[in-house]
Amino acid sequence: MKTTLFPIVMLILITACTSSGAMPQEPEALPFDPAPGKPAPVFTAIPTLTALPPAPTYGIAPLDDAQNIVYYFAPDICNAKWVNSGQELPCPGIHGQISSGYVEFLTQADLGLNYMANALLTIPSQDQKFFGIFGAFPAREIEFADFFRTQLYCMPGSLCDVTFSIGYYDSNGKFYEPFPDWSYNYTEPSHLINYPLDTLDGQTVKLTLIVRDNGNSSDDFAVWVEPRIFRHPGITRPTP
């Protein structure tokens, strides 16, 4: 499904204009709240912009490691459970309905790339009741040489300011988020992520992709370019 960006952007502009400007409140943690105890975001006004967002610069094509990829997230998008920490979200998202959060599969054509690549568009909740979007993917066993790889960016033409992160549910359904956050603003070049998953060696987990707004969710069209698990051929599990 292709994203028609103009109607979505217009809807967000209208929503921003009619917002009351009230300080958002941290929602009560629910049984499936992916990140209980996280501090509430502090609202900051969007500055007046005098220039258009920069053209996308995704760096090198991310598929030079294809022969060692053991899992691609994007094609499995709707086998994941998507929530905003208070409500379950439809997958794919319904065009024009992004107030609770939104997710969609993208291709290189949607992003203006000159190489083949899949991506995930993840828009955190826009209604100021919740502050993120979370996608828990099917359970899989992680090996010592596995790395999480992706490129982080904003949808071309959007003014997003978000924090990306990953977490996981263990085999008992308990959620953990021990990995770093990656804050990202539309003015920056794409962030290349290559993070080791060796601490999960031997565990069967549901890896979870997370995007939180940084105080204001308007125009937070966050993109994961080719999120995947890379198994390094030169790394082996240590001998006990």
Image: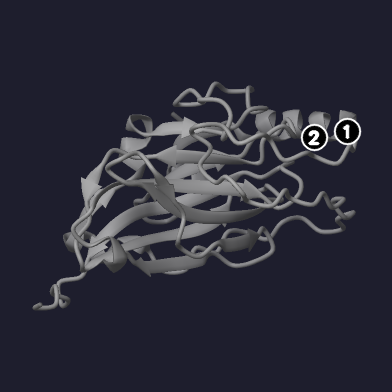
Which residue has dot 2 on it?
A: 13
Tell me which residue sits at (62%, 61%) in the image: 184
Picture coordinates of residue 19 (x, y %)?
Answer: 87, 32
Q: Depth check: 73 or 108 in front?
A: 73
| Circle 1 crowding by C-alpha within 10 Å: few under 14, some 14–19, many from 20 | few
* Mark 1: secondary structure: helix
Which residue has dot 1 on it?
A: 17
Name which residue type carries label 2: Leu
Q: Quadrant of the C terminus?
A: bottom left
Picture coordinates of residue 215 (x, y %)?
Answer: 75, 49
Give the answer, above or below, for where 184 lies relative to 30. below
Picture coordinates of residue 204 (x, y %)?
Answer: 23, 48
- Viewed as shown, does residue 87 lie left or right of 186? left
- Viewed as shown, does residue 98 lie left or right of 104? right
Q: Depth check: 185 or 124 in front?
A: 124
Q: Mark 2 and 1 residues: CB-CB less than 8 Å, in contact?
A: yes
Q: Disc 2 and disc 1: Cα gap in Å?
A: 6 Å
Q: Quadrant of the N terminus?
A: top left
| Residue at the left extreme of this rendering | 239
Picture coordinates of residue 10 (x, y %)?
Answer: 75, 31
Name which residue type carries label 1: Cys
* Mark 2: secondary structure: helix
- Viewed as shown, does residue 73 lie left or right of 108? left
Residue 230 seen from this side? yes
Give the total number of marks visible in the rendering.
Answer: 2
